Amino acid sequence: MRLRAPDSGVRLAELMAALSIATDLGMGQPLETALRTCVVAMRLGEALNLDDGTLRDVYYQALLRYIGCNSDADALAALMGDELALRHDFAAVDTGRPPEVLSLAMHYLRQASAGQPAYRMAALVARGLLTLPRVMNESFAGHCEVAQRLAGRLGLAESLIVCLGQLYERWDGKGSPRGLKGEAVAPAVLLVSLAQDAVVWARIGGPDAAVVTVRKRSGGAYDPRMAERFCEKASTILAGLDQEPTWDSVLDLEPGGRDCLTDEELDRSCEALADFADMKSPYTLGHSPGVAALALGAGRRCGLVATDVTALRRAGLLHDIGRVGISAGIWGKEGALSEREREQVRLHAYYTERVLARPAPLGRLGALASQHHERMDGSGYHRASVGQTLSPAARILAAADAYQAMTEPRPHRQAFSADEASGELRGEVRAGRLDSDAVHAVLAEAGHRVPPARRERPAGLSQREVEVLRLLARGLSNRVMAEQLSLSADTVKHHIQHIYDKAGVSTRAGATLFAMEHALL
Ligand SMILES: [Fe+2]
């Protein structure tokens, strides 16, 4: 029997379902649109008696259809304004009908050039309309190429990668990127397009609107046999979508085996998702792997246990996945942000937590990742957590993100030199916003000289061990200590053993007396 590497506790389908939440955000769709599309597509696929291999492609195509969505966000925002609002509206358009596409484009081009003198606005709109076909083609082709490359890195099947190359193809040959026609388009592609439109139109006008739209577009965007079957069975195919817990329904529908990803596979997937997140803006390319590398090294320097170090690296890779839900126009804005735009920016940390909320092993990563803008004095976001509630890992992640971001250019400033970034970070420590141990570890990891010794504590205890000792002396259980200090139970156990070793004691009572002797309480 072949020995399998250790499981990460996360199924491929679970990771893809989580990613689909991120792509809903990136496409300006209500959360769980892709999950609903997956349910509808699988029901229709079964009604059409598709074979298992095709159903598997349908399943993942529905979840991953838009993993290339960040590839053109910046260019689209520059031309059309809020690309998320545009994409939201575009989802209801029939791309085979130029008047529909043009009318939507006109609306956004006008909005994007609002406030300009009339002659300038007219010129901008005219130029926008002229470049529209090229922009759309490039945009669709870019979505496909990026989706295919990311899917390859996520270890998905070759047949699915072929489907992702045909994302915007249509039955009538009027699609992109290659204008394939009829049977030349993979059935999974046509079926998922239909399912997604049905979900969008059912939301707009109920099941009847979905049937009317599918019937109207039969033979255009969709294979007529699929459209006919959908219209026959629409009431069962669309039944209960609003009431059912879609996450569970989608996971129950996964075709084939339900193996967990190995630890190594999860690491590789996190690396791919880091690139997915960083593509949102040209200013953040390479940002997340940079944060992950600094956080990993700093975590080791701080003596975190191996499981916490692994979590720290993964959280570093995933921390900005929520950026996808904020318009690229805001990330790329050169001037000062308005109050509303600042509020949007603060949301990205929450979105990271939301995308990674399920299943539990991802939820733990999401909770840590979403704390990367928290500050020790409670001035950070999105929860405005304070000092003691931030785990050592969260403090390190915040310091690593701050350092990495400072050494990268942003629209309103040049990149800081390494020395300037180091000075800024030390300033944050003096101001009480970043943790000194975390900053020193990050700076050391980045190659800076840092003070070798911190203030003396008895028996060489670290600051964190003193915090554990105080709670230990008060008789709290390991579980309560872990909760209060935002640590894992393993880390608390690890700290207690260190305290015992360093203090030369072997019981809680001995440790309590040690704390009293050294006035640590
Ligand atoms: Fe961030």
Image (tube, rainbow, N blue to C red):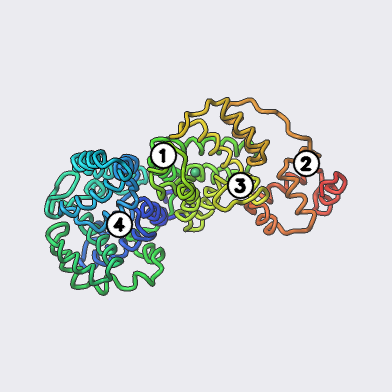
Residue 269 x %, y %: 41, 45
Residue tagged 1? 333
Q: Earlier in the sequence, mark 4 or mark 1?
A: 4
In 3D space, how far apart are the residues under numbered discs 1 and 2 (Cα atoms)? 52 Å
Residue tagged 2? 502
Question: Does residue 48 sit above or below 409 in this rendering?
Answer: below
User: Is label 4 in contact with label 1 (beta carbons under 8 Å)?
Assistant: no
Query: Which label lies toward us, 3 or 2?
Result: 3
User: Looking at the image, which residue is at 77% across and 51% down?
Assistant: 470
In 3D space, how far apart are the residues under numbered discs 3 and 2 (Cα atoms)? 35 Å
User: Is label 4 in contact with label 3 (beta carbons under 8 Å)?
Assistant: no
Q: Earlier in the sequence, mark 2 or mark 4?
A: 4
Residue tagged 4? 62
Q: Mark 2: which secondary structure?
A: helix
Q: Mark 3: which secondary structure?
A: loop
Which of the labelled discs sits on residue 372, or is there none?
Answer: none
Q: Residue 205 sits in which quadrant?
A: bottom left
Q: Residue 94 sits in which quadrant?
A: bottom left
